[in-house]
Image (tube, rainbow, N blue to C red):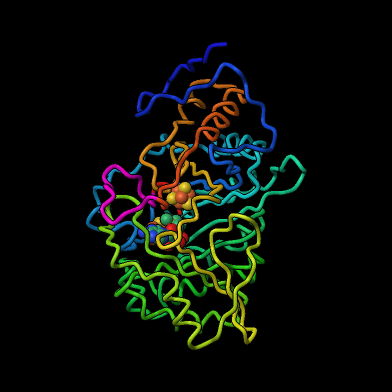
Amino acid sequence: MTAKTILLTDHRSRRPAPVVPGVPIAPSGRLADTRGRPLHDLRISVTDRCNFRCVYCMPKEVFGKDYPYLPHDALLSFEEIVRLARLFVAHGVEKIRLTGGEPLLRKNIEALIAQLAELRTPAGQPLDLTLTTNASLLARKARALADAGLRRVTVSLDALDDTVFRRMNDVDFPVADVLRGIDAAAEAGLGPIKVNMVVKKGVNDDQIESMAEYFRHSGHTLRFIEYMDVGASNGWKMDEVLPSADVLRRIGARWPLETLQPHYAGEVAQRWRYRDGAGEIGVISSVTQAFCSSCTRARLSTEGQLYLCLFADQGYDLRALLRGGASDADLATAIAHIWHGRTDNYSERRSADTPRAGRIEMSYIGG
Ligand code: SAM
Ligand code: SF4
Ligand code: SF4
């Protein structure tokens, strides 16, 4: 049988539509790539805009007033997102994370959450449906998000000291409002809450101990993320990365730690707990300890490009298929075909001088 060509109606599409092999691949709930890695998580970016200008993600010099954000009609509609999500779930995705940009800036995001919350895995289970946010709008929205069916949130917070935090978000946003958002989310039942701190050496590494102290006994899990060379605009240098081993050494010197087993195979964060029973922390060592061999994540960009790696420079234009009249069977076949061919393992190959031009930005694809 020959491969089908789907007619494109969207002339802004920069890449050809993915090939839909002539032999349909029906979803079996199990897909494996070339290294046997299953497709388990889907991250969906719902906007490329953000009200913060974090220095490691959307530096002001690049993301200024004239930055060409996507026009509204380029964004996947909620209908299109849900249609794709349903097919990904049929293929084995059990966890969906909404991200961005700042996902709470997407108008009526609760309506999207309500529709995603209705999806069921092939075994009839609801999804692990979560969202990553800078929490600027969380105090206002937590209740509505929980009512819509969101299970949990992850909040990004890089410092407890207001001056350091305002310098990092670069829009003068105060720590107190993020902490209020975290409290509101906990009250609304969106826990256990994870708090992500990106550690940039010389910028906020002096905040490690105070952040740890604040979240001890809180029931929230603080996770330290190594500053990564995502995108092409943050001017990343290896010597600005503080290895997770150093973070653990510093915290452990004050509050002894012990390791915990992962919740599931392929969990990104390594889990630790305080020996005195004050709770759990995590480290995400994307730079110093590659975890590509167990990477089960696919990423859908705001405009419907499917990326198989955070460091990819090329996606697969699912929107072109959607808007070109592809059937569900065609879409499911294309997704399976793409995942079957996946070879990505960037973090295993990273070196300080790997070229970065052309790489997708974190704000476009989400974390
Ligand atoms: N705006 C939301 C937020 O900040 O939580 C969601 C999108 S943001 C791109 C997702 C996550 O990526 C955040 O936790 C952020 O700290 C992290 N991130 C962004 N750029 C990063 C980088 N260069 N290295 C490591 N983590 C990064
Ligand atoms: Fe915005 Fe999140 Fe990027 Fe910060 S990390 S600029 S909050 S998208
Ligand atoms: Fe996954 Fe790519 Fe990160 Fe490796 S570098 S863990 S393949 S996203």
Q: Position of residue 84 (x, y in %)?
A: 58, 35
Q: Position of residue 251 (x, y in %)?
A: 48, 82
User: Residue shown at 59%/41% (left/top)?
Assistant: 36
Residue 51, visible in the rendered structure: no
Q: Position of residue 294 (x, y in %)?
A: 55, 51
Name the image quarter holding residue 147.
Answer: bottom right
Closest to the observer, 9 or 19: 19
Let me know if residue 355 is in the magenta part.
yes
Closest to the observer, 139 or 69: 69
Q: Name the side, left or right, on which 21 lies relative to 10.
A: right
285 above or below 66?
Answer: below
Let me know if residue 137 is in the magenta part.
no
304 above or below 67?
Answer: above
Q: Name the side, left or right, on which 117 lies relative to 153.
A: right
Residue 200, visible in the rendered structure: yes
Closest to the observer, 215 or 69: 215
Q: Name the side, left or right, on which 154 lies relative to 244.
A: right
327 above or below 350?
Answer: above
State which quarter of the image contains the N terminus: top right
Q: Residue furthest top?
A: 1
Closest to the observer, 259 or 117: 259
116 above or below 261?
Answer: above
| Magenta range | 349-363
